[in-house]
């Protein structure tokens, strides 16, 4: 589905997700740097490893949200397009119905005229 024909009522969330991921990756990179280069005490080192793991898990979860948002947006656009198609079909049915009503009225008039022709008129004699 084209991104240029987007009918979603919400803004794109990817820039927000990108911002959060960037912040998390920066925190992860800083924690990795401290863990590898600053020779922290063992208990701090273990905590840094846990923080890194949590940040990686968080990034993965946010990527899942991004994918779900894209799927939801695509689904919504498909539903919008389908609704437009159904509205067009409805409008065509309404036009056809109006034409048929006119046709019925014309046929009623024709029947009345024919009935008048078939009705015996009074004999003037």
Image (spheres, rainbow, N blue to C red):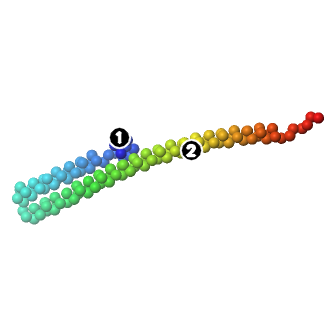
Q: Which of marks 1 and 2 is in front?
A: 2
Q: Nearer the viewer, residue 87 or 18?
A: 87
> What is the quadrant of the N terminus in the image?
top left
Point out residue 27 in the picture as x, y percentages from the top left corner: 16, 53
Q: Callout 1: helix, strand or loop? A: loop
> What is the quadrant of the C terminus in the image?
top right
Image quadrant where residue 48 sits? bottom left
- Who's the residue at 7% across and 57% down the image? 36
Q: In this view, does 99 lie above or below 34?
A: above
Mark sitting on residue 96 = none
- Who's the residue at 13% across and 53% down the image? 30
Q: Callout 2: helix, strand or loop? A: helix
Q: Residue furthest bottom?
A: 43
Which circle's residue, 1 or 2, is located before the other in the chain?
Answer: 1
- As measured in the structure, the alpha-carbon distance from the residue carrying label 1 to the one carrying label 2 is 31 Å
Point out residue 118 in the picture as x, y percentages from the top left corner: 81, 40
- Who's the residue at 22% across and 51% down the image? 21
Q: Is residue 73 above or below residue 43?
A: above
Query: Which residue is under mark 2?
Result: 93
40 sits left or right of 23 in the view: left
Point out residue 8 in the picture as x, y percentages from the top left corner: 38, 46
Image quadrant where residue 107 sits? top right
User: Marks 2 and 1: in contact by CB < 8 Å?
Assistant: no
In this rendering, the count of numbered labels is 2
Q: How crowded is mark 1: few (under 14 residues within 10 Å), some or many (20 or more)?
A: few
Image quadrant where residue 49 sits? bottom left
Q: Residue furthest top?
A: 124
Point out residue 26 in the picture as x, y percentages from the top left corner: 16, 51
Q: Which of 20 and 99 is in front in this view?
A: 99
Query: Which residue is under mark 1?
Result: 4
Q: In this view, does 17 lie above or below 106?
A: below
Q: How crowded is mark 2: few (under 14 residues within 10 Å), some or many (20 or more)?
A: few
């Amino acid at each position: 589905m084209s991104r240029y024909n987007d009918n979603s009522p919400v803004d794109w969330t990817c820039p927000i997700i990108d911002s959060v991921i960037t912040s998390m990756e920066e925190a992860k990179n800083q924690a990795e740097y401290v863990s590898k280069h600053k020779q922290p005490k063992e208990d701090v080192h273990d905590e840094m490893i846990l923080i890194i793991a949590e940040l990686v898990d968080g990034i993965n979860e946010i990527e899942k949200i991004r994918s779900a948002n894209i799927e939801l947006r695509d689904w919504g656009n498909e539903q919008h397009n389908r609704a437009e198609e159904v509205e067009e079909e409805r409008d065509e049915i309404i036009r056809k119905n109006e034409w048929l009503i006119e046709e019925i009225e014309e046929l009623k008039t024709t029947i009345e005229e024919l009935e008048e022709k078939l009705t015996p008129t009074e004999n003037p004699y």
